[in-house]
Amino acid sequence: MASELKAAVIGAGIMGAGHAREFNENAKTALVGVADLDEEKASEVAKKEGTTAYFSADDLLQKAKPDVLYIATPDPYHLQPILAALDAGVKHILLQKPFATSVEHAEQMAAAIDNAGASVYVTYGTRSRSESAAGKFITESGLIGDPLFASMRNVDNISVPREMWADRPDNWAAASSSVPFLYSHRIDRLRWYYGPAEVATVTAVSRSEVLGYSTDFFESILTWTNGLVTRVHTGWVDFGSLLVYCENIFHGTRGMITHNETPAFGRPTAGWQVMFDEGTDLAQVKAAQDELLERGIGTRLFWEKPNTKGIPKTVAGLEVVPKQKEVSLTDYIIDAFVEGTPCPASWKRFQGESSLPTHRDGLEQTRVCCAVEESARKGGETIRLR
Ligand SMILES: NC(=O)c1ccc[n+]([C@@H]2O[C@H](COP(=O)([O-])OP(=O)(O)OC[C@H]3O[C@@H](n4cnc5c(N)ncnc54)[C@H](O)[C@@H]3O)[C@@H](O)[C@H]2O)c1
């Protein structure tokens, strides 16, 4: 169909294979090719998705001439493909997180994107989950008061750095760590919830006893321009039974959100819950529940006594009802390309007036992630960003 956007993927690995399928499944895009330096991988994905395999980014860009490009190369290798795509005149680009693994690369990329006038979105995929969107709405609603403190723990099973990429010729895990890989998601969530506040200082420590070629974990405290304090822990040496584990708490002065993104320790499902201070106006809580429902996010309203003897108060809360099917961030971004706006109608219905994550978010995410690594390298020295 003439109205379909010609879409292609560079990097046909774990993520790229899925993105090729997403382009095939979206009625607004037609998959015109996948490229990978690994010929076997490119051929395998191309065959599965019924498209053409290319064995270099340049070859794909010259021959397939895509309107939309998804770059899903490993963490340290986002610079070259994006510069090549911009040089080839591609104006619509989705880039897997992290934006970059160095501030130098990130600034070079952001300048090239601005010069080319291209629309580039970084796919921090958790933004399109109902629970994440509910968290943004409640944080911004003022119902839990002013931002006070947030704590996030996001770890991968040790098999992720040890085995998932073990067959890659360049073993790219050695040139990355849990900071570009996991922290990038966390910092994006925090900036998204608490913006326009930005990170003011970063203090981090790490250890490297287990993996050897990469850092085992990072523990960090960030202070923000609005007084918020956040603690973020990311690691790559989890010995639990889950591939990824992630738990978050967002505290306000009048309530708090608990968001377990993965089930664990007997909890049958992941979950999202907000609990309000006892003085909270229930009519306002119900109004927030109605607004969330308008956005397609179902919640259950509850009253509970904290499970401790001698605490008489009853607190009110909302709990997100798990959704059967979520729309992927890719689909929202394709809508952004079609409509020429970072807040397309589909996203606006779900998230209100909020932009999809652009390269500007990517640049700031990289600055914070690099400061975390720098602080840890310097033995916990505080890095001031602003
Ligand atoms: N959004 C998420 O939740 C999420 C989850 C996992 C991974 N990721 C990100 O996605 C990216 C890819 O991860 P992956 O697990 O798919 O990695 P992968 O190693 O499975 O795939 C990357 C592929 O890119 C190819 N490649 C490297 N340089 C290339 C180049 N210049 N031109 C063409 N192909 C090239 C490699 O040969 C490899 O096949 C990473 O940045 C990673 O952090 C995101």
Image: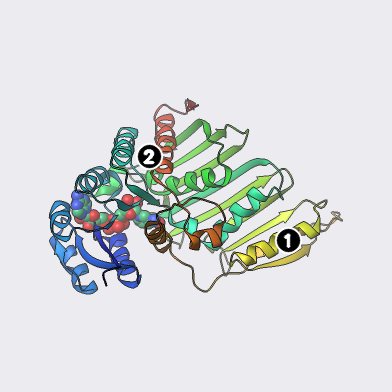
Residue type at mark 1: give it.
Ala
Above or below: residue 260 compared with residue 25 = above
Where is ligand 1, by quadrant? Answer: bottom left
Q: Up-down: is 279 above or below 116?
A: below
Task: Determine the CA span between mark 1 and mark 2.
Answer: 49 Å
Secondary structure category for the residue under label 1: helix
Identify the element where label 2 is drawn. loop
**Residue 165, position as x, y percentages in the image:** 27, 55
Identify residue type, mark 2. Answer: Ser
Q: Residue at x 63, y 33 (%)?
A: 227
Q: Earlier in the sequence, mark 1 or mark 2?
A: 2
Which residue does the image show at 26% across and 69% down from the upper left?
Answer: 2
Label ID, residue 254: none
Q: Can you say whether 26 is above or below 280 in the image? A: below
| Residue 384, horizontal then vertical, whole percent | 49, 25
- Marking on residue 208: 2
Residue 264 in view, yes or no = no
Q: Is residue 95 left or right of residue 191?
A: left
Q: How many marks?
A: 2
Residue 185 in percent (x, y) is at: 45, 49
- Left or right: where 286 falls relative to 39: right
Q: Quadrant of residue 329?
A: bottom left
Front position in the image: 375 or 255 = 255
Mark 2 neighbour density, 10 Å: few (under 14) some (14–19) many (20 or more): few
Check whether the beta carbons of the residues at disc 1 and disc 2 lie within 8 A of each other: no
Q: To which residue does mark 1 refer?
A: 287
In the rendered structure, the answer to whether residue 102 lies left or right of residue 277 reads left
Residue 43 seen from this side: yes
Quadrant of the rendering where the N terminus is positioned: bottom left
Q: Nearer the viewer, mark 1 or mark 2?
A: 1
